[in-house]
Image (tube, rainbow, N blue to C red):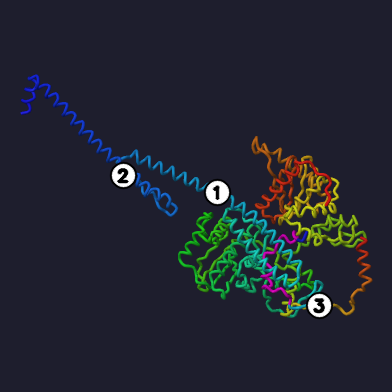
Amino acid sequence: MTPARRHSQVRLARPYLITEGRTLSARHDLDLTTLVQAGTSAAHVNGPERAQIARLCGRGALSIAELSSRVNLPTSITKILVADLIDTGHLSTRTPSAGAARPSEQLLQEILDGLNAL
Amino acid sequence: MARHIIPAAFRRGPLITKSAGLAATLAGAVALARQRQRILQLEASHDRRDAELAHLVDKRLPALDAAAHGEHDPGPLRPETDPGFTRSLTELLTHVTELTHGSAEHAGRTAQHTMTGVLDTVRALAAEQHVAVNTMQHRHEDPEVLADLYAIDHASAQLSRRLKAYSVLTGAWIGQQREATALVEIIRGAQSQIRHYQRVTVADPPQAEADELDRLGIVSRAVEPVVLSIAELLDNATRYSPPYATVDVGVRQAHHGVAITIDDAGVGMPREEQQRAARLLARDSVELAELGDPPRIGMAVIGMLTSRYNFQVTVDAPPAYGGVRAVVFVPNEMLTRVESTTAGHEAPADTTESNAAAAPATRTPSGLPKRRCPRRRPRGRRRGQRGRGPDNARCGSQRREPGRLAAGHDNTRGRPRQLRRVNAVMSMQSVRRPDLQWMLEDVVLLPGVNSAVVLARDGLVITASEGVTSDDADRWAACLSSLRGASHAAAEFNSATAQWQQTLVEYDTGYLVLISAGQHAYLGVSTTKNIDMGPATKRFHSVVTRLGSELSTEPRGETTP
C-alpha cells in the first residue's frame, strides 16, 4: 500500500482540531524512538485524543512511533499531544538505562550489510 | 275591425295583391326582428366569450402560475350560460397545466442529473485532495509546513462537507462509507468540518458514563449522515451566535438511544425561521428552487438525511442559553459497541494470530518472526527474492510517493515516468500490454480502490495496476473471466434481450466491479467498503472508454522512455 492509500480512511477528527492549531511540540527532546509511560498525575485528561494516548501508555511504555500508528495520527501531532501530557504530568519519558550505550557504527554497518544481503 | 277588412281585401282583386305584399312585408319584418334578436344574442354570447377569454388570460392563467404558492383556479365567470365553451376552456387549462408540469419536471430532472454528475466528479477530486493533504501531514514535521497544511486540510474538510451536502440535496447517495465509529470521533469529525471549529466545546460526560460512552459507536452506514447532520447544525450554531460565544455539545444516553445536544448562545430563531426549519426537517425531498438565493441548505439536507436514515433532529427544544438547542437523536438500532477509542485502530488480536498461522513465510529460515509489510506482503517478498538491494526490499511506499504525486492525473506528463516504472516493476511474462498500466492509475488513485486488472475475454491479463504481482494478476483475471461468463449466461434470467453491462459483487470487506472495456476486454476493480461508489463508477467508466479506444488499436511497438 502506498501511503496515499494506507491513510485512505482519513481520520474524521483532523489534526488542526486535535492540536488546536499548534504545529510545534512544546518539548524538543522527543523523537520517534522516545519511550513514554504513564506519569504521576491522575487528573482528568482534556481532549479525547490525549485521553486515548494516556490510556495506551497506562499499559506500559510505548515509543512515539508506535503511539502514532495506534492512534492513527501523524508523528508530529502525536509529539505535540505527548508534550502536553508530559507537561500536565500524565506521562513521563522513560530514561534509557545506563548500561545501554549507543551501538557502535561498525555494528550498525554490519547489520545494514546483513540486511542488504537478505 | 280587422276581421272585416281582410275578407274584403280577399274579395277585391287588387286588394289581394296589396295584402299579399303587406303579408310579405310583415313576414320580412318578423324575420328581420328575429335576425336582429339573434344578432343581439350572438353579440352577447360573443361578449361573454370575450370576457371569459379575458378572464382566462388575466386571472386563470396567472393563478396557474401561482399554484405553487397555494392559489387555486378561480374557475369560469359564468359556467351555466355557455357550458360547452367553458368546459373547453377548462380542458385547455388542464392540458396547459399538465404540459407545464411535465416540462418543469423534465427540466428539474435534467438539472438534477447534470448537477449530480458534476458533483460526483468534483467530490472524487476533493476526496483525493483530502487524502493527499492527510498523507502530507504524516510526512512533514516542519512547523511552518504543517501550519500551511492545517489551513489546506481545514479548507478541504469544509469543501468535502459542502459537496456532500449538495449531493444529498440532488438526491444522490451521500458517498463514502466508514467503519462503525465511536460517537466521540463522530462529534470531533463534525467539528473539524466547520469554519469556526475552535468555538465548539464538547462537554465531558459524567465519570460514571464516560467508559460506557467511550465504547458507544454508530453503525457503519449511518456514520457519514450523522457526521454531516451534526456538522450542519454546528455550522448554523456558530454562524448565528456572537463570535465570542462558545457552542456546547453534550451527549446524553437515553432508553431508546442517544441524544446529542448542540446549544448556542445566539439570538435564537425568529418564529418564521423556526417554521421554515421544521418544515424542511420534516421533508424527504426538496426542490432546488426552494432553497433561496444564496441557498440555505442546512436544514433541507438534515431533513433528507433523517428521513433516509431514520434518526431524528429537532431545533425547537427549549434553549439552554437563549439561543437555539438542536438535538440529534440516534435510536438504539443505529448504535453499536465499538472498541474503546483506546483500541480503536488496533487489529483484533485473533486476526493477527490466524494470519500468522496461515502464512508460514512470516518466519525467517532461522525461525525468527519476520516483520510483515502491512497489506503489501506479496510485493515486498517478491522484491526481496529478486534481491535488488535494500531499496527494493523496503516495505516500499515512501519511495514511490514523489513519482506518484508528480504523475497525478496529467496523463501526458505522467506517461514517460509511468513507462519507466513499468519497465522496472512489471516484468510480468503474462501481461500483454504493460504500457497500458498508467491508465489504471486514475482508478487506483481513488480512495478505497485496492487494485485493478484489465483482462481479455480468454481470461488472460492485459494489464494490472501497479503493485499487483504477476501471479495474482493471472489468478484474478481467470476468476474474473469466469465471473463474466457466469454473468453473461445469467442475462436471460433478466430478459431475453438483456446485454451484460457490468457485474458488482459485494463482500464483507469490499466490492468487486467488472466492466466491459473495449472489444473483448474487461476491467476488474477491487475496492474496500470505504468507497464512494457514485463517483467511482463514473471514473471506472471514463477509464474504460479510454482503455477501449486504446485496446481497439493494434499494440504499439516497444516504447522506450
Distance from disc 2 to disc 1, alpha carbons, whole Å, reads 39 Å
The residue pinned by badge 3 equals A94
Q: Tell me whether marks 2 and 1 sit on the same chain.
A: yes
Main secondary structure type of the part rendered in magenta: loop
Chain letter for mark 1, please: B
x 60%, y 65%: residue: B231
Tell me where residue B331 appears, x and y as whole percent: 59, 61
For disc 1, the marked residue is B109
Kindly identify the residue that appears in the image at 70 percent across and 58 percent down. B128
Instruction: Answer with left or right where residue A117 lies relative to residue B473.
Output: right
Give, as a three-letter code, the residue at label 1: Arg
- Give SS at disc 1: helix
Q: Position of residue B175 (x, y in %)?
A: 64, 56
| Residue in front for this viewpoint, B346 or A30 | A30
From the viewer's perspective, tell me whether residue B331 is left or right of residue B490. left
Q: Which three-letter amino acid code belongs to the residue tagged 3? A: Arg
Dot 3: element: loop
| Residue drawn at x 5%, y 28% as measured from the top left | B1
Give the SS element for disc 2: loop
Residue B26 spot, x, y in % from top left: 16, 29
Residue B78, label in figure: 2
Q: How far apart are the two marked residues, 3 and 2, measured between alpha carbons?
A: 97 Å
The crowd level at tag 1 (other Cα within 10 Å; few <14, some 14-19, many 20+) is few
Q: Amino acid at mark 2?
A: Arg
- In primary-sequence order, the first of circles 2 and 1 is 2
Would you place residue B303 above or below residue B27 in this image? below
Of the residues tagged 3 and 1, which is closer to the observer? Answer: 1
Magenta highlight range: A4-25
